[in-house]
Image (tube, grey):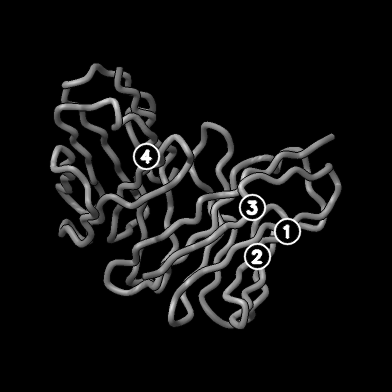
Amino acid sequence: AQSVTQPDIHITVSEGASLELRCNYSYGATPYLFWYVQSPGQGLQLLLKYFSGDTLVQGIKGFEAEFKRSQSSFNLRKPSVHWSDAAEYFCAVTPGGATNKLIFGTGTLLAVQP
Amino acid sequence: DTAVSQTPKYLVTQMGNDKSIKCEQNLGHDTMYWYKQDSKKFLKIMFSYNNKELIINETVPNRFSPKSPDKAHLNLHINSLELGDSAVYFCASSSRGMGNYGYTFGSGTRLTVV
C-alpha cells in the first residue's frame, strides 16, 4: 500500500533562512506527488505537484521541490522563508488511476522566528 | 469565483443529532471527495464519487452517508453524532479525464459535537 512519511513533526526557522521539509513515499511505481499548505483555520492550498519530466518543480510562493527516485523522496525547499510561511505543510501521493486516492503524510508544522 | 465551497463553515451540535454538510464545485471536475482531519491534523479519505458513482468507501461508520445528486455536488449526512465525530471535514474535487490528478479543496467544515 502507498504511504507517505514526513519525519519532522515540527520545524522552527528564522525569517530569511532557507527551508527544507522532508517527504518520503512508499510506492512501487512513480506516483503523482504533491505538497499542500494549510494556514491556521484554513483549507489546503496546493503548492506544487510532480507528475513526470523535470524532477525539480517550481510552485507558488517561491517554493520548489525535487523528486529523487533513488531515495523515494520529494523534499520541499524555499531559499528564504517569510513570516507568512508559518503553517502546516502536507506531502501527499496518489497512484492516479480509477480511484485517484490522495494519501497524506502526517504534516510538518513550520514556525518562523523573527 | 471558481472554487469548491462547503457549508456550513462551523457546526456545533449535541450528541445524537443528525447533521448534513454540503459541498459544491464549479470547476467542471468529475470526481469529488470527503476527507476527515482529526485533532492531530491527520487527513484521511472517507468517500469519493465519480460522476455520481461511489468509487471509494473507506472504513467509515455507516452513520456517515454521502450523497451526490450530480457531479458538481457531494453532500455528507451524519446520523446519531458522537463525540468522536468532532473534526474538520474537507470536501475536494479533481478531474482525472484531463490528466490532472491534483485536488482542489474546500475551506473545511469544523464540526464540534458536545
Which mark's residue is nearer the viewer, 1 or 4? Answer: 1
Q: Are marks 1 and 3 on the same chain?
A: yes
* Residue corresponding to mark 4: B5
Decide which of tag 3 and tag 2 comes sooner along the chain.
Answer: 3
Spatial CA distance of label 3 from label 4 is 31 Å
Which mark's residue is nearer the viewer, 4 or 2? Answer: 2
Amino acid at dot 2 = Asn
Decide which of tag 1 and tag 2 comes sooner along the chain.
Answer: 1
Q: Which residue is depicted at the point 44% across and 65% down?
A: A3
**Mark 1 element type:** strand
Contact? badges 1 and 3 (CB < 8 Å): no
Amino acid at dot 3 = Asp
Contact? badges 1 and 2 (CB < 8 Å): yes
Which mark's residue is nearer the viewer, 1 or 3? Answer: 3
Instruction: Please count the marks in the image.
Output: 4
Q: Chain of mark 1?
A: A
Q: Are marks 1 and 4 on the same chain?
A: no
